[in-house]
Every structure is written in structure tokens, then in C-alpha cells.
Image (cartoon, rainbow, N blue to C red):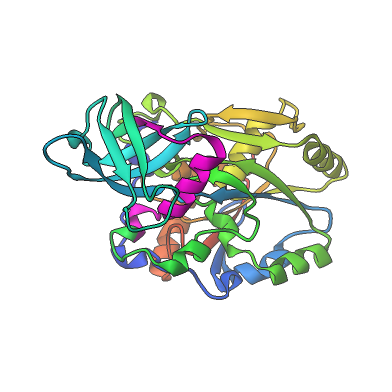
Amino acid sequence: MRTDLFDFELPPACIALRPASPRDSARMLVVQPGGALQDRSVAELPQWLQPGDQLVVNDTKVISAQLKGRRIGRETEPKIEATLIKRLDGSRWRALVKPAKKLAPGDVVRFGNEGKVCLLGHLDAEVEAKGEEGEITLSFSFHGPTLDQAIADLGTPPLPPYIASKRTPDDRDAADYQTMFAANEGAVAAPTAGLHFTPALEAALRYRGVGLHRLTLHVGAGTFLPVKVEETSEHRMHAEWGSISAETAAALNTARAKGGRIVAVGTTSLRLLESAAAEDGTIQLFGAETAIFITPGYRFRAVDILLTNFHLPRSTLFMLVSAFSGLETMKQAYAHAIASGYRFYSYGDACLLFRARE
């Protein structure tokens, strides 16, 4: 399909720079099969679900993947900013850097500052390889848990550029950009639909008879990037690592056999569930990378309902929701959301999507 089919105009004022407080007070646009729209709030989610439905959340935890430093060992020492996007092994990470033109294979970047206590006060990494569009491979001077601690000490959580370009990230973001389910470190971006949840909302869902299950998909930066090619078939997805336990898979399969619906909290949960689903919709034990790219025409096997945020134009995520509820339905829903003052993107409002009738 042509990428421009998934384009739309979004006024900059619609981009949320802070989350709603409390989190479940965010607005929720309900998009029903056939395209009927209702304006609600996330706190009302239990009313839209039935006893026996099963909610699936992503328990990945955002790491402090944003590092600032300088190139050392040459006459000049330009400042370098790096965002870690994928762990390769105990000491090597793939990263996006700027300005990339200042770095070449063999260069050493020193992150942190000597005045801050972190092991030796700083963290060195050698540029092992250089790829396209600012992507490099960094080989760090520390390994394993020691490296993890150094990154945690010296780095900051990476806010999406549409927020960071409008205001300076601060201490509030360290808490705001983490879901209440966060447990397994490894994401460089938050599974943002999960940001709407509070203990009160979880309690209300359980009282309603809705089950809650966890899976892990370590979200990478590539998930949110706009698609730059003209045809969707030419786009290459970044692979992300995920896992679904045998216990979770069995519980979901049992519930579905009894008529319960699978409700994915976020596109990350949906993508992993669909990656782990057999042709008949049975969810399997999963522990691997997935690069699933869902566009209109995809036949959903596992997920019946999706709670998600509002996504960027021409993004793989807007393509996914268009596959789930229909492209024209989602264009109309987004037009309604913009006209009604909904807040977009990571810190923004939510929409509850029911899968289009096949």
C-alpha cells in the first residue's frame, strides 16, 4: 500500500507534553465496529469490558538509554549524544548518535562527567561499526551488570523527540515515562498505553471480572519512526525481543475457549500476541525477537480489543490500528479526536478499538 494513505495533518498544539493526572483521568475515544465513536475516559474502561475478558499488559521497563558525552583522543572533542536502541551482548549496544558525522570506527566516546560519581566517574565506548542514518555499534569498557549500573547512573530516560524538542526533560519524566507494570529492564521507549493505568483502575477491572496478564516486549526506538519509503512493502521493521510465559499463554487460551476476549494494552502487547499466535489463534510460549509489521489486509488471530494511544502520521503504529479497525474508520476517528481536542502521542489520551468485522 502507498505510505501516503496513512498521512494526516496534526496541529502541534495537539501533542501532549505532560501526562494526565491521575493517569486514568485521560480521555478515551471508543471506536466501535462500524465506526461509531463515543467520548469517554480511561477510568470507564471496565464498563466496556465483560467478565471473563483478559487484559494483557507489557511489563517492560524503560532504561536510562540517553547518554551525553564527547569524542576523545583527537585534537577536538565534540559533544556527542547517544540513544541506546538495542543490546547486542554483555558489552555492546547499537545506538543512534548525533552528530554522527563526527564519529568514525575506532573513535572513543566518553560518556558522563568526571565530577559525577559513577565507578570511575565516566564510561568509555569505542565505535565498533557505523551504519546508516546515525546508527552505530558501541563497544563499552564495562560488561554485564557493571555496565548496566553505569548506564543507569549516567543516562536519562529517552523522551520521544516530539516532547524533548519542546521542553527540557526533568525529574518528573523519570516517573511519568514508566508504567505501573514496569519490571523487566530493556526498553528504550515506554509502552505508552500502559501509562494510563493506576492501582484503582486495576482494582476496578478485577472487580468487573477481567483478568490481567503480563508479557514482555522490549520496545525499540524504531517502532515509532515514520515510514519513509513510498510503499509499505519496502519498509524494514526493527526487531524487538519479547517473551510470553507458558503460564500466561495457557491462561489466555483457557479464557478464550470459554468466550473471553483478549484485550491488548498497547500495540506492543498486540504485536507480541500476534507473533506468538498459531493459525487457529492459540497463543504459544514465546521467547525470541519479532519484527512483525501489521498493515491493512492482515488477519488478526489473537487480539479482539486494543487500548492504545494516538499515533504519528505515516507510522507503522497508525498502519497497525488501521489494519485493526479499518483505514477509513481510523481516519474519521483521528479527525474527530483532533477536532475535539484530544491529546496525542506518548503522554496523550487513549482510544479503545474493537476489531473490525471481517
**Residue drawn at (82%, 42%) of the image:** 256
Which residue lies at the image location 53% right of the left edge and 55% below the top edge?
192
Q: Name the outermost residue toward the front.
A: 120
Q: Residue at x 41, y 41 (%)?
A: 84
Q: Which picture quadrant has residue 124?
A: top left
Q: Locate the C terminus by quadrant.
A: top right
Q: Is residue 10 left or right of residue 296?
A: left
Say above or below: 134 vs 38.
above
Provide residue 27's location: percent of width, then percent of height. Answer: 54, 69
Which quarter of the picture shows residue 356? top right
The answer to whether residue 225 of the structure is visible from this angle is no
Q: Is residue 294 magenta?
A: no
Residue 228 image point, x, y percent = 30, 35
Instruction: From the top left corner, tell me how far across and down residue 216 is, in percent.
Output: 64, 42
Q: Is residue 246 visible?
A: yes
Q: Nearer the viewer, residue 210 or 244?
A: 244
Magenta part of the chain: 137-163
Q: Indicate yes or no whether the magenta region holds residue 145.
A: yes
Position of residue 292 in the picture relative to residue 156 (left or right): right
Q: Quadrant of the N terminus?
A: top left
Q: Nearer the viewer, residue 219 or 20?
A: 219
Count the numbered circles shown. Answer: 0
Outermost residue on the left side: it is: 75
Left or right, 88 with reference to 253: left
User: Against 4, is 347 above or below?
Assistant: below
Q: Position of residue 224 (x, y in %)?
A: 42, 44
Residue at x-position 28% and y-position 34%: 108
Which is more toward the observer, 61 or 68?
A: 68
